[in-house]
Amino acid sequence: MRFDLINMFVTIINDCHDDNVMSRQATRATSFFNCPVSTIGIGSFKDIEASGNIVDAIDASDLHEGIILVNSAPRHGRGKKWPNGTPFAYFTYKKILVVSTVDGLTLSLAKKLGLIDKLYLTDIPTVIDTMIVKNKFANSYRELVIESQFRSFDYVPRLAKWLMEGEEIPSIEYPIEQIEDTPMAVWWVDNFGNCKTTMLASDIDHKPGKEIQTKFGKIRCYDHLKDVPNQEAALVIGSSGLKHNRFIEFVVQGKSAAEIYHLTSGSTLF
């Protein structure tokens, strides 16, 4: 699949998000793609945050052409099962290329919303060696990329560039059913303390005025935040999501739901 490298966007979603790391990634992406680059820093070991931000980035693009580069990788425990961390895979949705780690919940909301038709898993040494044979990459830099501890900087932008240029990339199809299902949980806490959840209205049969039993007691449903009485906790239709599929938010009007109920990304309401 060949993309037009003009009039497109790049979004970087990464759990290595200090200023040094994010600026290096943005600079590399800009040098490769010569287009606007935005960055989203997520918490360490917070793959559920990556999951929601992938959906929001796709939505924000208004489905224009672009690239989303995602790294949210466990570096301990199950992350040790891979030779050099969780591998990267890619898929396309409309005109958007998504290159992402596959372990954990990172792709769970893309799966839930049916955004992934086919997911292609790559092996870094195999891809790099193939590009060396094609004279697309210098052999002298082979070990630098293959052994890199910063794969989202040394490998992922190059993989995306080759894909955008229409290069055939060696890969295997990764079964979508092996992507973890998303739990009914908070995936993001905004600066007001509103909690974006992975739940759609259909998941909880959300209707204005309906009360839903949660671990914090019965919480009333409203369509909009403006409808919620002052100081009241509520479940509302949030702004995040894609098309008509918007995620439910747990809010307290005029206060921080996250602080009052001690919620962070990954917290459950039931």
Image: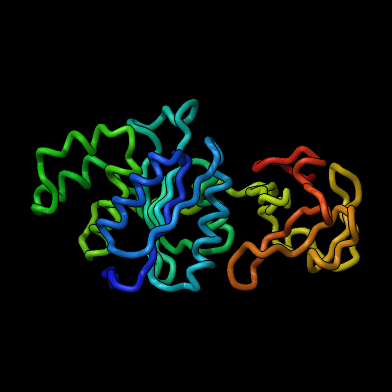
Q: Does 45 sit above or below residue 229?
A: above
Which residue shows up at 54% across the image and 64% down it?
A: 114
Q: Can the viewer see residue 185 in this picture?
A: yes
Tell me where residue 238 sits by quadrant. bottom right
**Is residue 57 left or right of 204 when viewed as pictured?**
left
Residue closer to the observer: 111 or 268: 268
Q: Quadrant of the C terminus?
A: top right
Residue closer to the observer: 134 or 230: 230
**Is residue 33 left or right of 132 when viewed as pictured?**
right
- Residue 185: % across, % down: 69, 47
Q: Can the viewer see residue 119 in this picture?
A: no
Which residue shows up at 40% across the image and 38% down it?
A: 86
Residue closer to the observer: 21 or 203: 21
**Is residue 201 left or right of 107 when viewed as pictured?**
right
Residue closer to the observer: 24 or 224: 24
- Residue 266: % across, % down: 65, 41
Which residue shows up at 55% across the image and 61% down it?
A: 56
Which residue shows up at 40% across the image and 53% down it?
A: 69
Q: Does 94 sit above or below residue 185?
A: below
Q: Does 243 sit above or below residue 121?
A: below
State how many labels appear: 0
- Residue 4: % across, % down: 28, 73
- Residue 70: % across, % down: 43, 49
